[in-house]
Every structure is written in C-alpha cells, then in structure tokens.
Amino acid sequence: MRFLLLVILIALLSAAAEVFLPWWGIAVVSFIVSLFVSLRPGKAFLAGFLGIALFWLTAACIHDLTNDHILSAKMAALFHLPNYVIFILVTALIGGLVGGLSAWAGALIRPKVQT
Amino acid sequence: MAQNKGRSPIGGWVLLVGVAILVCLLDRSPFPGVPAIGRLLDPVHGCWANAEPVNKNFSADLKLPVANKATVWFDNRLVPHIHADNDQDLYFLEGYVHAYFRLWQMDMQTRAAGGRVSEVVGEKALPYDRRQRQKGMVYAAENSLKVMEAEPHTKAMLDAYTEGINRFIASLTFRDYPIEYKLMGFAPDKWTNLRTALLMKYMADDLTGKTDDIALTYLRDHLAKDEFDLLFPERVAGATPVIPAGTAYDKPSLHVPVAPADSVAFPHFDAAEFGEKREDGKGSNNWVVGGSRTASGAPILCNDPHLGLNLPSLWYEVQLQAPGLNVYGASLPGAPGVIIGFNDSLTWGLTNNYRDVKDFYLIKPVSDNKRSYWFAGKQLDYAKRIETIKVKGKPDIIDTIDYTIHGPVTYEAQNAKDGGLRKPLAMCWMGHRSSNELRAVYLLNRARNYSEYVDAILNFQCPAQNMAYADRAGNIALWGQGQFVNQWKDQGRFVMNGSDSATLWKELIPMRENPHVLNPAQGFVASANQVSTDSTYPYNYTDGGWVNLRAWRINKLLANVQKATISDMQVMQNDTYSELAAGMLPIMLTELTDTSSGKYIKLLREWDYHLNAESVAAAIFQIWWSNLYSDHWAAYHLGNVPDKQLPLQEVTMQIIGFNKYFPLLNEDGSRTSSIGEPIISSFKKAIDSIKKLEKTIGTDWYKVKNTSVTHLAKLPAFSYDHLKIGGWGNTINAAKGNHGPSWRMVVQMGKEIEAYGVYPGGQSGNPGSKYYADFLQQWVEGKYNKLQFLPNVNEQKDSAIKFVWHVSKG
C-alpha cells in the first residue's frame, strides 16, 4: 500500500514539476522523493519507474486519444516501430527508466535511517 | 531497522552522476540525425504536445500590437479570412497566421534560399550552402531588399508582416515549437525582411535556374550547323506560342542591336560538364476562356503551377480584407499578400515564362594575380564578397566569392575534374538585380480593372511569368511579364566572351512592350511554358526551358470548347491525354515486328493515350519511350555532354517519328537511318521491365511512376507516396515523381464570383494535425474545394465559418 502510494506520489509530483521544469523534472522528483522516503534501492527503482511510466503513459494516452493517433502513428513509422501502441509504450519506458534510475540513486544516497 | 545491505552512498553518487549523464544524453542530439529522445518523448513538452486534438477549438481572443480591432475567421478547412481596418494590421496578422501554421517551413525554406542549412543540420549541407552563396542568392536578396525598403508601401507591408511573425515566435516556448524543431534540435530564428526577400529569390532561382548555355556552347562546335539546328531548334516546329500567332506587335521603341562577330561573342569549349543538370518538365498551365466560349457568358480562368510537391505545402490559402482590398488565393508562407488568386474585380494566374534571363560569361583571369580579370582591354579588380557559413558543431566556413562586371564567378567540383569545363564562368542573372515583386503583389491584390492590373504587374521583374487575367467586365488577357534585356540575336544562348564589352547586357526592354494580348479573337489564351510569341515579336529572346506537349493539348481542347463550364475546366486540368503517346505510339507499333509479346501489344493498340492512374498501357508506353529516347541519344554522337542535355522529347518525336530520321553511328562511323531495330530492342527491354514489375509492385501506371508528396525534411513518415494519380510531364495533369500541379484553381468571374481550388496538402504544417494533408486525396482524385469568398464586412454569417480570432490591442 505504501509502495503504491509512493508510485502515485511520484507520478503526481512529476506532473506538477513539469509545469515549471523541462522533461528532466521527472528525474529531480524521483530522486528527491526516494531521498526522503525509506525504501530499499530495488523497490525505489521500481517505484520511480512505475511512477514516471504511469505519468508519461497517461499523458501520452490523453494526447493520443484526442488526436486519433495521427501523430503517434507517424512517429512510430519514423522510428520504424510496428504501430502507435509501441510508440506510446516506448515513451513510458524511457520516462520510466529515467525515473527508476533517479529513484535508485536517491535510495542509495539517502542517509542511514534510524529505527 | 532498515537493512543497509546493497546500500552504498558512494555507489549512489556514482549512479547519480550516471543518471545526470543519461539525462544530458537524452536532452540533446547524441549524433547528427538522432533526436534528443528525452525532450522529444516527453508527453508534456515534447512531440506529444504536437498531437493536436482533432476537435481542437481554434477560436481565441488575442491581445496583439494592432492599431485597431481585427478579426480572423477560419472556415471548415482552416482557411483564414483576415479582416482588418488598415494595411498594417492586415499584414501583421498575415505574418502571424503564416507563422502560427507554417513556421518551421518558412524558417527552413529561407535558410535553404540563403545557404544557412548547415547551421542547423551540420556539415552535410555544406556543399548545398556554398552553392547557394556562390550563386549570389544573399547578394540578390540584399539588392532587392534595398528597393523594397525604399518604397514606402512595400516597406510598411514588410515591416508589419515581419513583426507579425516575430510576435508569434516570441510567444513560443519549446513546448509550442513545430515538431520538426524538436526532431532536428534547433529553435525558430527571428524573422527579418531579408528573409522574405530571400524567399522571393528562392522562387526566382527555382524558375529561372536553367543552365544549358554551357552544354549548348560545346554542342554548337561539336555538331554541324544543320544538325545542331535540327536537334536544338530555337522554335520547335508547330509550336503554338503563348501570345497567339498573328497578334500584332507595336513598333519597338528601342533599336534592336546587331550581333557582334561570332569570334568576338562566343568562346569555344571542348567539355561541357559544369555541375548543374537540367531538369525537365518543370512547368505550369494557365488559360483563360472568354465569355463567348463559356456557358455562363462570364470568363473562366484556370491555373495550375507545377512545382515541387512538398509538405508542408508551398502554398497556403488565405483571404485578406482591408479598406479597398478583398482578395483570396494562394499565398507563400514567408511573403505577404496573395500570389495567385482573385479579388472582387479580377483574377490572375501564373506560369513560368522561361525566356532566358540567366547567362554565363567566360572570365579571363589576369595570369599573375588572383585579384583581377580582363575586360575591354583593361584589368579590372574582382569585387570580393565574403560569405560566412555557420556549421553546427564546427567552426565557421568562410568563402570568398569573386564578383565581375557580369556577376559572381561560379566554380563547381565537376568543373575542375577530368572532362569538366575547367574554366571560370561568371553568372549574369536578372535575379541578381534589385526588383520589387512584392510591389506587384500589393497592387495586383488591389487592382480593379485591366489598366490597374497592367500597372501592377509591370513591377514584376523576375522570375518572368505568363500572367493570365480575367475580370468581371468580361475581359481576358495574358502578359509575358518580366524584365528582359534588349538582346542581339543569340545573345546569352551560349556562354559569352566575358572580356569583351560587346557581350554585356545593355538596355532593358520597356516592360509595356512585353508580349501581351487583350481579348484575343480566338476567345481564349493559354500558356504552358511554351515559347512566348511567334517570330514577328520585334525583340530577340532565347530559350530558357520551353516545352510544347501540354501547350499543344490545351490549345487543341480550347479551340473546340463551346459553352465551357467550371466543371469542364476542372476536368481539363486533370486531363491525362498524352500528345507524345498519340504522336509516337502508332509509329512505334508500326515498326514493331515482335509478335511474342502479343498481350502487351494488344493493350497498346487498344489504348486511348490517356496516362490514367491504373493504365498498364500507359506504363508500357512510358517505359518503352523512355528506353527508346535514352538509347537513341546515347548511341547518337553527342559527345561529352551531360546526360540530361538532350534534345526535347517533342523534338525527338518529330525527328525519329515524323521525319523517320534516325541517324545512328555504325561501327565504321557511317550513319544508319533504320528506326526499326532500336524500336524493337527498346520494346524488348520495356517488356522485361514490365514482367519484373508484374512480380513486384505491379504495372499500374501510378505504381510505376510513384507520385509522392514529400516532407521538406525528407522524412518518409511525414510524406505520402504512390499516390493513385495519372498523368506525367507530357500531360496537362503533370503529376510527376515529386513534382506537379501544386495549386489547381478555377475561377469564373461572373456577377457572382465562383472559385474552386485544391492543393496537395493542408492548411496546417503540423504532421500531428488533421489539417496537415487533408486536401491530398481530393487533389489525387481531381476534386476541388469551393473557395469561400466572404464579403468585406465586419460581421460574417457564412455557415462555413468554424473558428474566430477576435484580435484587439494589447
């Protein structure tokens, strides 16, 4: 449950960050959140990955649905991907990786937690 | 207590640095041609922001630096109808709207014009940029800008237009950039009046770019005179000139000069390779049919300029309204006004005139220095022009171009190699001179009658255009309009001796003496890039790229037209009947003794000579003809000539078809005139190709020819290919590979103005918009949009209006 909340927290804070920051706001948010929330590194990676992937996936899907896949189909062709769904997933994956790695770094750097 | 296993702060810092590096890598292009993936995929600011909602509401209240309130109505095709109460606001808004929908294209095209592409794509564009600088493109634009800015109306129009574009650019953040900026990794550059001047010169270069003077100079020495005249006639036999034969011309006000001695005028070449290859089949059609030949009794004007087929499209539809102005038509994003269209009094259309206005001079350098050259017995210093080319990721490249009294000295890589010309040539081009075509556009948009029309177009110098005209009073007219030099016979047809003053361009022909016709007796007038006049026109001029096949077809059709309707004219614009096939194929079939390919021969015998999209016969004929044409000229002793500098197809047809004159060199050097053998061998080759095509892409003509509309960055994903459209360069519907009718327009100037148009693209330059290429299918099918010509009033009730911008001062 805590993990799930964390995923959602990262997603929401990143969305807020991107109002003010360029795309790398997702890295800043994932890093800082995992710096302050106690999680094992592996789980931190997963939380960062899922949080950002969730955010980017949702945002991309909203754009894509209102756009009738016009752009995503062209972008998929541009990158030699089989179809627009894959392009959406690639978007989520790239965002997720950046989020996950940032969260992992945060978890490793986090000061030792007292009981 | 939380486990500390696997947790090492040092590892964390290392990872953090790694993440930072990763973010940096994804934030910028790692290699040329690879986009910044992170920035690009970001669904908030990246490419996803360009995924325009299909039901986007474009309506808005805009605060802009306008003098008064203004309105832009967008119709259901996203055509803006801009209404302002003064010229300044009008052109400001046209600039703003152009940039809103077409910014990247405007930026790229003017970069291309001025040789600034390397600045954004890196050194792979360097040869292209250097060539543009060498041709004097920036020099030309600067010259024109001086006179444009010296004329108060043009300056005011340009300043307002530029301000509109820059105002839009200033409102952008990365998120709002056209997607191509995000893919290519650069940012919109500020607009300047110079960039508009560059765009005008880009068009001039595109339309007057032919450089066959060099090859002809070589061939003139290489071939016997009668042979040269046969292969490269000044006037193709049976040409139907733009201004109908028999039209009377006034006595010239200038004395037509006498040619200097041949030995003074022209040098001799033993090679012809210089670099630029000739491009065949660039051209356009326009015609006007007078009321005596239309069903409604009102004149109808038709125009389809053939240009490169690109996305975003070269053209952008717009209606402009201000006091004394109500004009609709195709505009060029990057330039103010309407270039081809109609207003509430008259309509006009353009085709390329192709009188030669680009000549070459052989320069004789002074042997012991690099500063000077010989002219009229004296040593003159070159004017040096420094061209600085910025290159992405590399130091600037600095080129020095030598300017002579004739123009810039141009060298090419090919020029220096074996078989190359290896001589410095200076280029003398009308486009280098100051001119103010925008003044013509400004006045033309506002012209109310024939005399105002003429006053307007007399400002149009280069590229010379055949300007067709029709008005609501029932007049039709056509002008071969441009600035021309009073030449001696053959001046500029060949490379000239650059060290003798007798070869200089001297007087200019007064433009009112340009070939023109008002209300011709035949009741119609048509141009399709054929020769301007019959031989009775008093001034000399030479060929800059004339062709005849479309003109023959159009003139034949119009000579028989009675009670023409708008829809007849639309059908005619989409006509695919080939005069070449009709002339050649019966002869080719007669000579053919091959009976093993019966089914193909049967298709050809039954064919109606229409290059329709699904015609297999059309594909067979075109491949067969193309083989016959190239085999014939390859075997012919033309010597060391660039491959594309061959006699015209129609000339070839006349020589080998009609005259049965097919001289080929035998091995012993004697000539044979048997046309049967090459016809059979080229047919066999064609059938081999067709059989291969049957197993691969198919033999429908449209599959074989592959008409494509290509994104300007050559991205296949943003382009459309294998469009199911008929025609070719030898038919009215000249849809070639990547070139064709770029804007089809039919306007009937009756009591009510009825106008139709279509271009292969859409109003939005955004590949993520549903308006990106929404006219393409109609264009392919020969269908048209009705052009919504709104009255010049403050409130509009037209049901076609979908969105509104209310613009107020802010």
Image (cartoon, helix red, strand yellow):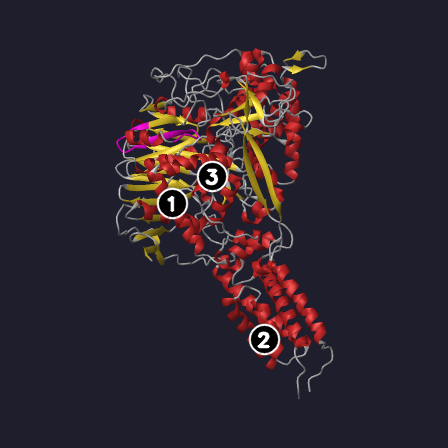
Q: Find disc 2 in the rendering and name its residue.
A: A7
Q: Find disc 1 in the rendering and name its residue.
A: B159
Q: Quadrant of residue B680?
A: top right
Q: Tell me the CA gap for discs 2 and 3.
A: 54 Å
Q: Quick check: B520 above or below A45?
A: above
Task: List the single residue furthest toward the right.
Answer: B5
Please state if B672 lies on the left or on the right of B568 as rendered.
right
Q: Quadrant of residue A3?
A: bottom right
The residue carrying pointer 2 sits among few (fewer than 14), some (14 to 19) or many (20 or more) residues within 10 Å by Cα, namely: many
Q: Tell me the CA gap for discs 1 and 2.
A: 53 Å
- Whether pointer 1 and pointer 3 mark residues with C-beta atoms closer than 8 Å, the reply is no
Q: Quick check: B797 above or below B499?
A: below
The residue carrying pointer 3 sits among few (fewer than 14), some (14 to 19) or many (20 or more) residues within 10 Å by Cα, namely: many
Q: Is residue B473 magenta?
A: yes
- Please state which of the two labelled residues, at mark 1 or mark 2, is closer to the viewer: 1
Secondary element at image label 3: helix
Q: Find disc 3 in the rendering and name its residue.
A: B198
Q: Quadrant of residue B350?
A: top left
| Residue nearest the observer in this picture, A24 or B74 | A24
The amino acid beneath tag 2 is: Val
| Residue nearest the observer in this picture, B351 or B29 | B29
Q: Determine if marks 2 and 3 fall on one subunit.
A: no
